[in-house]
Structure formats: structure tokens, C-alpha cells
Image (cartoon, rainbow, N blue to C red):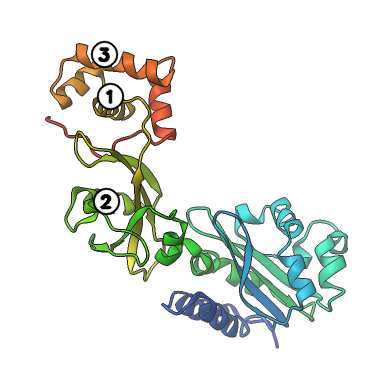
Amino acid sequence: MSSPSLTQAMDVVGRVAAVASEQAPQAARASAVFEELRKLIPFDAAEINTLHPITGEVTALASVGYDSDVLSHLHSQRFTELMKALALPITGRPVRMKDLPGDPFDNWAVGDVLVPAGYSEGLTMCLRTTDGRVTGVINLSTTSPEHPSDIARDAISSLCSVLANMADQTQSGKWLSMLIGSGQSAVGISADGNPIALPGLPDHDLFKPGSDLISYAHQNASMNSWSSFIWPQNLDDDMFRIRVMPCRGDNQPMSAVISLDVADVGPLTHRELEVLTLAANGLSNLEIGAALQISSRTVGSHIEHILDKLGAPNRAAAAARAITEGLILGQVKRFD
């Protein structure tokens, strides 16, 4: 097989992007990606794997050609450290044997693993999302030293975020629901902001359609980042810890999964949480007083109590602790 032209490579890139973004299961999409990539690189072995977002455990989505010994090396912590040393998780660019610094045979993965297994070239690329998360790795190996060509390597590079989204476990609302501890209430949120029941997880009154919490969580999910905040059901009831976990990627039936459990806010009162939340958002005592319809002198008294209870030396330290420990109310009733 001759090296592909730029036009041929771009055609393959388009087809790979299409099949990687389908609604089929991840493994099926990964296998379909291989069929398209073979038109670009005549590989003899290939693998796309996915990384557990918390533990970093490697799981193959699709693999052809590699024996179990080679795969065990590609899934090892030593190989992960090698990729870090080459800055692959940071750049998101593929590297071939010939691209390695120095003599490729000095690299243990080449000299001790891939070449003894019969491979003369290939490439490795960390699958990096546009927001900087590494969700998996693609490895391709050939018995011919002529492949992958420069054009093929660059074409693979242009697919980095597409393949990263395909391998991303956090795109699955089902997977996110598995992160939630037993006994916690949880619900999904559809793209249009309606609650979706999650099998096996208890519901809660706060998750009713049209509730303030559902609306606020849906707004947070649209920012595509995880968030945590405090939500009171009523002034005299327990405070709840709410976590909003967006389902990233296209073609997701849910925009987010939200969980609820009783929050431990320590000795802080509801009013102190309101004051602390507004202070953490940069409001002055005068502005906080206007928002809560209390005097700035009363606000100052609340701030003193907050500093004492949190053991914070000053207002800025208390605000920083509120943000890092999630002592922020999701919503404060304001009167301005």
C-alpha cells in the first residue's frame, strides 16, 4: 500500500469522525474506526483503550493483532510513565518510532516489546479532549517501516478530540450514576431541563419537574463542568449537598446527573451560609445587607461569627474555604 495523498487522508478523517460520533456502543464504534483507519495506515495491530476517570485503569475498547504480552505492556504503569515523559498527555499528538528522541531502540517499549513482537513502526497517541482530559490511548503498529507516513500521522492527530470523546466514560449518564453512593438520591436531567428517573436510585421531592433545584442544576450543567453546592429544602430543614455531573459529548440522552445527600455544614447557620455565599461572590457588607434586607452592621457581625467558626484569619480566607469545601448555597433569596 502506497502512502495516502492529502485528499485521501482527509476523506478518511471525515469518515472516522462520522462513525466515532454515532450512537452505537463505544466498542462497536472503536471497531468501525479501525476499518476506516486501515485505509490510511496498513496496520498489523491496533488498539483503542479507555481510561477510568478516577482510578486511571486501562480497558480495551477494541483490539486487533496484539498478543496478550504486548497488551499487558501497553496497559502498564511503565508505559503510562513513558507517555508522560514524552509529553503525549499534554500535546495530544501522535508519536511514531522514528519521531522518538535519540535511538528508538533505546526506548524500552520499542526495543524490548514492539520490535521483538515483529513490529517495525507505528504510532501512539493520547486521546485528549478539548477541555484537557485524557480519556484513552490509540496504538497502531505495522511490520513495514514505511508506515505511518507524515500525512497519515497528521491525519490521526486531527482526530484526537473526536476519538477522545468516543473513549470518554464520563459521557455516559449510566456510568455517572454508578459513581453515586448507595442511599443517595439522584436523577438525570434531559437536554431540555426535565428530570429523568435513574433505575435503582431513590427520588426526592426536590427533583420534581419545574423545581428551582432542577432549573438551577440544568443551568449549571450547561457550563459543562462538575459543581457542588448546598441547597436547603426549607429554612428549618436539613441542608442538602448537591452535585451536578454533566454528561459530556454529543448524542447524550441526559445533559447531567445530579445527586443529593444530607450536607454537613458544621456550626454555620442558614443565614451565615447566605452571607458567606454572597461574600465569596465578592459582595461588600453594604451589598450583602441590601441583598438580604439586613443592615451592614448585622452583616459585619455575621462575618465575625463565620470567621470564628471556620477558624479563618480574614474574609478572603473564609471565602476561599467556602469555595474549596463547597460551603456555597446554590441559591440565595435576594431582595435587590
Hey, what amino acid is under mark 3?
Gly
Hey, what amino acid is under mark 2?
Gln
User: Where 238 sits versus 286, above or below?
Assistant: below
User: Where 285 sits versus 224, above or below?
Assistant: above
Count residues near mark 1 (Cα–Cα under 10 Å), then give few for <14, some for 14-19, many for 20+: some
Task: Tell us which disc is closer to us: 3 or 2.
Answer: 3
Where disc 3 sits, the SS reads helix
Q: Which mark is residue 225?
A: none
User: Which quadrant would residue 202 be assigned to in this image?
Assistant: bottom left
**In the visual, does 154 lie left or right of 182?**
right
Residue 267 is situated, as x and y percent measured from the top left of the image, at 35, 25
Q: Looking at the image, which residue is at 35% across and 46% down?
A: 261
Q: Nearer the viewer, residue 81 or 182?
A: 182
Q: CA distance from mark 1 to mark 3?
A: 11 Å
Q: Looking at the image, which residue is at 74% across and 78% down?
A: 66
User: Where 3 sits versus 292, above or below?
Assistant: below
Mark 1 or mark 2: which comes first in sequence? 2
Q: Which mark is residue 272?
A: 1
Q: Looking at the image, which residue is at 24% across and 39% down?
A: 331
Q: Are marks 3 and 2 in contact (CB under 8 Å)?
A: no
Q: Looking at the figure, which quarter contains the N terminus?
A: bottom right
**In the visual, does 300 lie left or right of 77?**
left
Q: Are marks 1 and 3 in contact (CB under 8 Å)?
A: no
Q: Nearer the viewer, residue 295 or 179?
A: 179
Residue 12 seen in the current view:
no
User: Which quadrant would residue 159 be assigned to in this image?
Assistant: bottom right
Q: Looking at the image, which residue is at 54% across and 57% down?
A: 53
From the image, tell me which residue sits under label 2.
219
**In the visual, does 302 lie left or right of 179?**
left
